[in-house]
Amino acid sequence: MKFLDLFKKYGVVFILVILIIIFTILNPSFLTMKNVINISKQISIMAILSVGMTFVLLTGGIELSMGSVVSLVVVCISIFVTNAGLPVWAAMILSLLISTAIGFMNGVIIAEIKVPPLIMTLGMQIFLYGFTYTICGGLPVYGIPASLKWVGQTYIFGVIPVSAFIMAVIVIIGYFILSKTYLGRYFYAIGSNEDAATLSGINSNRIRILAYTFCGFLVGVAGIVMLGRIGSGQPSAGDGYEMDVLTGCVLGGVSLNGGKGNIGKAFAGILVIGVLSNGMSMAGMNAFMQKMVKGLVLILAVILDSLQYIKVRKKVKVIA
Amino acid sequence: MPEEKIVLSLKNISKKYPGVQALDDVSIDFREGEIHCIIGENGAGKSTFIKMISGANEPDSGTITFMGKVYNTMTPRLSKELGIEVVYQEFNLAEDLSVAENVFLGNEIRKNGMADMKTVEKKAGELFKKMKVNIDCRKTVKELTVSYMQFVEIAKALSRNIKVLILDEPTAPLTEDEVDKLLELVLDLKRQGYTIIYISHRLGELFRIGDRVTVLRDGKKIITDDIKNMNTDKLIAYMVGREMSFEYPKRTHEIGNVVFEAKNIIADKVNNISFSVRAGEILGIGGLVGAGRTELIRAVFGADIMHAGHTYLDGREIKIKHPKDAVEVGMGFVTEDRKRQGLLLEDSIQANISLAILKKISKMWVIDRKKESEIAEAQKEALRIKTPSLDVAANSLSGGNQQKVVLAKWLAADCKVIFMDEPTRGVDVGAKQEIYKLMNELAEQGIAIVLISSEMEELLGMSERLIILHEGNMMKKLSKEEFSQETVLQYASGIQ
């Protein structure tokens, strides 16, 4: 019982340590500086997305379209720069506007028309998947200028990847908003009791829309980092990211029921996913086996989330 | 008197929740065919006690004996099999199914593997006949009034072969004449041989139907005795642990100008109603359940749509489209259902108190934590909220203290007018008195209060003036001299 409580609280950290030990045994080069920096690059996109996902989850919602939006942003910037000849900064801003607008749209339809978030964002995911492939004709867009790749492939002081730096800034901003500002408190409040929050003068619809909009903006940032990393407009760039991000967040204790969780722990959850992917690749597991593991981890995460509601009961004994 | 047969007996039951000893070595015997009342303030351990018997939760130590067999714990299933049923305060009915279907829900009568609706309806009909309740078994539950839902719950319990029926605050949602009907039924069930465990805050009811009474306080059993050896003062003394006579505090302060005025309000279930309330005044709104009292307040507060009408604060017209607008101009709303609409149950007391003023105590969006805890601390002192710390979750408090947290939220927001919808529902006698005292203190500070209450005594005792509603219409305005239970009931029932 005591162990269970401890596990509920620090389970993610526990899992993280165990994974690191296992992977280091399997492949000693796992715990080298080079690989650690590599992992930080690999998780930067997921971590940026996880901040947005946490905002949405806290309000009791979910965002499943983010993978498709990342792909869309990647393709859009590429097309804007290569075909339309826009300057890099303009292409970036325009794409950020697009992803933010998509988030806003998700939010409005979910908050005002009361479409269940799962359905709304899943529909958006499917639609945008098709839309992205349509605008690029199903082919990757090549010919991206080097200045765009800078985001994903350069290092500050020769050690810290720019993408990891952006990730750190966003995680800190997310943490700050949630734990220090009144807006942050509003996200928690509507997630734990929307009626009470509304009657206390919080415009819960507006706050909910804000969560999705902010999430949309962060998805745009993640898209820019993604393009920098892969260096071409791949329409499949963001596929499946939403599930990895969701797994990480839930693993970190952000509740699917809303109102509970924080950025720090969500980040720890993302680290677990990052370490897991990297370690499995280094241990030579193929993509299909990796999928199996990831699926199991998602289920495990949700079990951990539900565990807090389950009580262990005594057995009935007839004494006399 | 011959030795009574004991049906159910709890021996040395203890139960600890994190931070609170909910039951402490409690032993009670229940005799066959008696109405045994359990009373106690909120947090005295009544709900935990029920959970021990129903198997919803298990004791840390102690035994439960049923018909001579001794068990270490109950489970929901075992308790049902033995013939124990609980009718909870919150109904467990499938609203879209018919009355008959609800009665036999989970206990379906089948014929060739198919639900046999005819038999179900017939059997349900017989059951209600036995209960002397006139009801159409084919109606869906959502068409029923609250009191009939209560009867369906009881019928559902009786449809199983039960010996012990536990009623948890069965009269809380009922109006006065519905209460009479329910008490009548309870007495009748006793005559039919059922053992009834009756939990209620309303002392008057206990004297009308109870055989014996057990008083719980702070998780301990204080006394079990025949009700004829008791009186109200004695019971209250046992409950609160000190002699206390119940009365409504007197007010002497001056009444000021009109603070809030509503003119010709039309909303769902509200038909052209106007009222005003002055600084330092408590305006009562009377009426039966379904008269449109809550709907009226929700409409002027922006929680529901107001089709027509005007609202004024300090003589200036205000436009309220959302509760946000209401809170911004200085209106507060203590809702009827504090758990669902009043509190963030799992959040800290401090977070609950500051909820309506977060924006005000923030600079550049950042919450001033120091200010927040100062305000919460001040409110805790002023309202005498009993808690070890402001960081504990709101749901760890007793009902009365939870209600104080809700009040604290609005006081922290410096409200000019506070609407209170059943502010003492589910609150024990001691906390009730305290809430009345607080209401008076608020009125003295010049706050205007609008009070909705289904408890006649409370309504008459606390209000300066009354408006009586009936089916969404304004029936009558009464001034203090015209107050009487009869007048209020007459207008509330729609009789001019």
Image: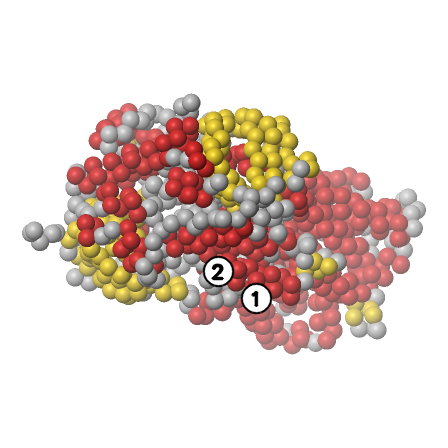
Residues B246 and A279: in front is B246
Chain for mark 1? A
Residue closest to the far left = B2
Q: Position of residue A44 (x, y in %)?
A: 72, 62
Mark 1 and mark 2 on one chain = no
Q: Mark 2 = which residue?
A: B385
Q: Residue at x 81, y 58 (%)?
A: A228
Q: Mark 1 = which residue?
A: A12
Q: Is residue B10 left or right of residue B335?
A: left
Q: Is residue B7 visible?
A: no
Q: Residue at x 89, y 59 (%)?
A: A147
Q: Position of residue A50 (x, y in %)?
A: 67, 57
Q: Closer to us: mark 1 or mark 2?
A: 2
Q: Is residue B162 above or below residue B135?
A: below
Q: Tell me the number on the disc at residue B280.
A: none
Residues B448 and A232: in front is B448
Residue A227: quadrant of the picture: bottom right
Report the amino acid beneath label 2.
Answer: Ile
Report the amino acid beneath label 1.
Answer: Val
- Circle 1: element type: helix
Q: Is residue A152 visible?
A: yes
